[in-house]
Image (tube, grey):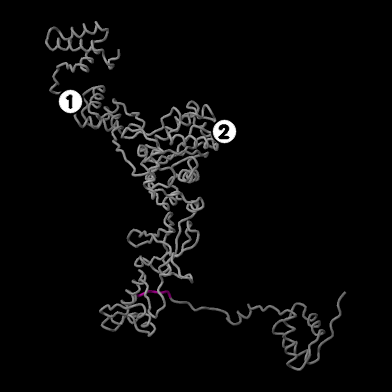
Amino acid sequence: MDIMADLSPDLVKSLFALKESIDAGRGDRITQVHAFAALHGKSPATIYTWLKRHTGYGAGRKKRADAGRTKVPDETLTFIAAAQREDTRANGKMILPMGEAMNIADANGLTVNVSAAHLSRLLRQRRMDAKTMIAARNTGEMRSLYPNHIHQIDPSLCVLYYMHGKQQMMREEEFNKNKLANYAKVKQKVWRYVRYEDASGSLDLRYFEAEGETQESLFEFLLWTWGRQEGRLSYGVPEILLWDKGSANTSHGIQSLLNAMGVDHRTHAAGHAWAKGGVEQGNNLIETHFESRLRFEPVSSISELNAAAARWVRDWNANCIKHVDARITRASGLPMVRDDLWQKILAHPERLREMPERSVCQWFMTAREQTRTVKNLKISFAHPEIGRSAIYDLSAWAEFLGQNLPVKVTPLLFREGAIRVEIERLGSDALVVEAAPTREFDEYGRDANAPVWDGTYHRAADTADERMAKRLASAAYGGAEGKNIGLTEADRLRAKQTKPFAHLNDGKGVIAHSHLGKTELPARILPEARELATPDIAAARAARIEVAPLTHIEAAKQIKARLVEAGGAWSAASFLWLQQRYPDGVAPDAVAAIADELAAGREAAPLARVK
């Protein structure tokens, strides 16, 4: 009979009789207990346990007056406990043995006056031992308010992989820390992506073949798990997303997409996986309830694996797997079907946000940081969700803007084409505002809210640049009293050549150059200059100048013009003569002499060609 099992009524009655006899002092307590133990074939320790549990018997020993006290100083206990805790791995393995900790404490002047076993016992009694300290973190239960309030996502390496069209499993004896080469052989590993919906506990599952966690796999999973899928009830974009600090999770493209959808994505600190315990438990359920089946009915590809996973997710969330209770049990103690809980989103229809189309989501994955230039307090931006360029009026923030000022722009989804605009501010954090596109136009395509021509000038709001320009104009033309001067008035004064800052120096104006030439220069000693001996500069230049000869055609044009002017004539024979007489071209200064020669009729017959 187990000492913790229920005893028969007769045996309990006998125990009460034994207790009464011991309390009455009818004999030696130890003798009576040993005799009872021998009678029932049990040890005296078992009999004492029965007496304590079923009769409320106590040994009657008084607590020692020095209980809980020790001659080991508190600073020694604290140092040794802290040293062992700091040298303990996350898996609970303590690296620093007690003897080593005692040696270090002694070397640092602390009193160590008991054995290692005694010190270990003292630490356990005071709950200062490393094992207790590792488990000391107290975590509170958090709750979500409605379906799609909080999602948890976790990618993890699966024990499955596919090679040569066949399903394989990573066995512990083949894939461990001492056989990392075997991991390297499996180039395309199978990664399991799990989504846990916090309010209902509903799960979703998708597998990807890749060398590691990638942005592409995560992007595809988000499209899948937040989109509508046949056979799966839960879908939609959450308000808050919890996950770890994986490189794919923190990539620029994924973060841009989540920010645009208004998802508050949070990562837990390293070693704090309990912060997303729902999805961690989901991984365990998938391993034990789904992946365990694949050993008996293998699949040959990722597509077949995902098809099987989708069928399991469908039945698990609906609790329709025969002989398996897939319901979730919370603090109330009542088992509840996950799909039934998720359907409570009917009471919160505004929380069901449908995933945008793939083309819209892809825009955020490839787009770089967008900047636009402010023109007349407006910017133009082609929003991916509305598919065309739109005008955004920023006049509400005119005091922070200026003409041609660059601003950063991020499109927002589920906001009817709204954008987030980041305006840099000197000496302060950037101003982040949300602007909607201009939606109302008249029949001529103009902004319906723009002022109408009615003979009245409608002044636009002053920008930061305009305020500074007015300040500077007032400084230049406002006089000693600093009268405010508008930009139009400043332009008029400039056109009249009005002297700026005329009020300075008692009305004399700015001293800009009259103060120059009065400063005493330092004395400098220079060497005596030597006379420059050079040849005749003009002759030297003439000797160096070489003029390119004219071509026959250029020379013929100039000679012909001179001949015509002098009443002479130019013929083809004249051109042939020129070519033969000056085969290398004609020097420019020889043109006049040749023209005079031809005009005088001294043109010779063409020279005979040499054969």
In terms of secondary structure, where does tag 1 sit?
A: loop
Position of 214 with respect to 426 (left or right) is right
Task: Classify mark 1: residues with Cα within 10 Å, few (<14), some (14-19) or many (20+).
Answer: few
User: Spatial distance from mark 2 to mark 1, Cα to Cα?
Assistant: 64 Å
Residue 174's place in the image compared with 539, above or below, is above
Outermost residue on the right side: it is: 611
The answer to which quarter of the image holds residue 477 is bottom left
**Relative image position of residue 108 (x, y in whole percent):** 24, 32
Mark 2 against mark 1, which lies toward the viewer? 2
Q: Secondary structure at mark 2?
A: loop
Q: Quadrant of the N terminus?
A: top left
Q: Is residue 516 visible?
A: no
Residue 300: assigned label: 2
**Which quarter shows the C terminus?**
bottom right
**Horizontal arrangement in the rendering, residue 52 relative to residue 446 (left or right):** left
- The residue wearing badge 1 is 68
The spot of residue 127 in percent (x, y) is: 24, 29
**Residue 4 left/right relative to 159:** left
Vertical placement of residue 229 versus 291, above or below: below
| Amino acid at dot 2 | Ser
Q: Which residues are magenta?
A: 522-527
> Which callout, 2 or 1, points at the residue further toward the start of the chain?
1
Name the residue nearer the viewer: 174 or 144: 144
